[in-house]
Image (tube, helix red, strand yellow):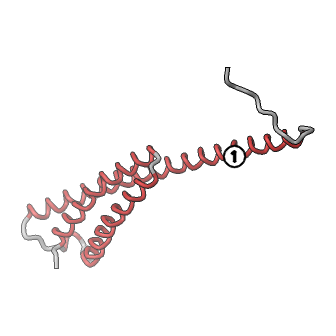
Amino acid sequence: MATFSELIRLREGILMRLVPISERQREIVESGDVSLLMELLGRKFKVFEEFERTEQQLAPFKDIPPEERIWDSEEERLRTAKSIEHSKELIAEILRNDERSTGLMAQQKDELAEQIRRMDQGNRMQVGYAKQSPSGNVRRFNTET
């Protein structure tokens, strides 16, 4: 079984791999490439599964108060504390990137809904004009000059 320090460093390493994935996710969302986004999310899910497994392995250690943990050295305790703090920063960065991605996707969804609404409104207007025409045909105008 891995030690607390080893698991903390493993978790930090996983988070360091998730940060660029979350940044790339935001870039892909901005570009609107859904297929590339799905591919990236698949990779992100696999890395996140590693994170979850590590969190499960850390669970028994969370019941031990920090002051009661036994350390091989003061250096190990300090290194682990730094890794924990760095992990908190990485998690915050991942969450910020995910929030931006989610916000961008919501904005894109709203823009798409508005485009569909305008297209539907335009189609209804064309149908209305066609119904008003005595012959039932819509007159087409030559827009080329």
Check disc 1 and report its element: helix, strand or loop: helix
Residue at horizontal 28 percent and vertical 69 percent from the top: 50
Closest to the observer, 50 or 71? 50
Quarter of the image for the N terminus: give it: bottom left
Where is residue 106? Give x, y as percent. 54, 50
**Is 58 on the left-hand or right-hand side of 133?**
left
Closest to the observer, 139 or 115? 139
Image: 45 above or below 60: above
Kind of residue at disc 1: Arg
Image: 66 above or below 123: below
Residue at horizontal 25 percent and vertical 62 percent from the top: 14
Residue at horizontal 30 percent and vertical 67 percent from the top: 51
Closest to the observer, 6 or 48? 48
Where is residue 103? Give x, y as percent. 50, 49
Quarter of the image for the C terminus: give it: top right
Q: How many labels does the image show?
A: 1
Q: Which residue is disc 1 drawn over?
A: 117
Q: How crowded is mark 1: few (under 14 residues within 10 Å), some or many (20 or more)?
A: few
**Is 56 on the left-hand or right-hand side of 39?**
left
**Is 84 on the left-hand or right-hand side of 111?**
left
Image: 44 above or below 100: below
Where is residue 12? Give x, y as percent. 23, 60
**Quarter assignment of residue 44:** bottom left
**Quarter assignment of residue 60:** bottom left
Where is residue 4? Give x, y as percent. 18, 72
Residue at horizontal 65 percent and vertical 44 percent from the top: 114
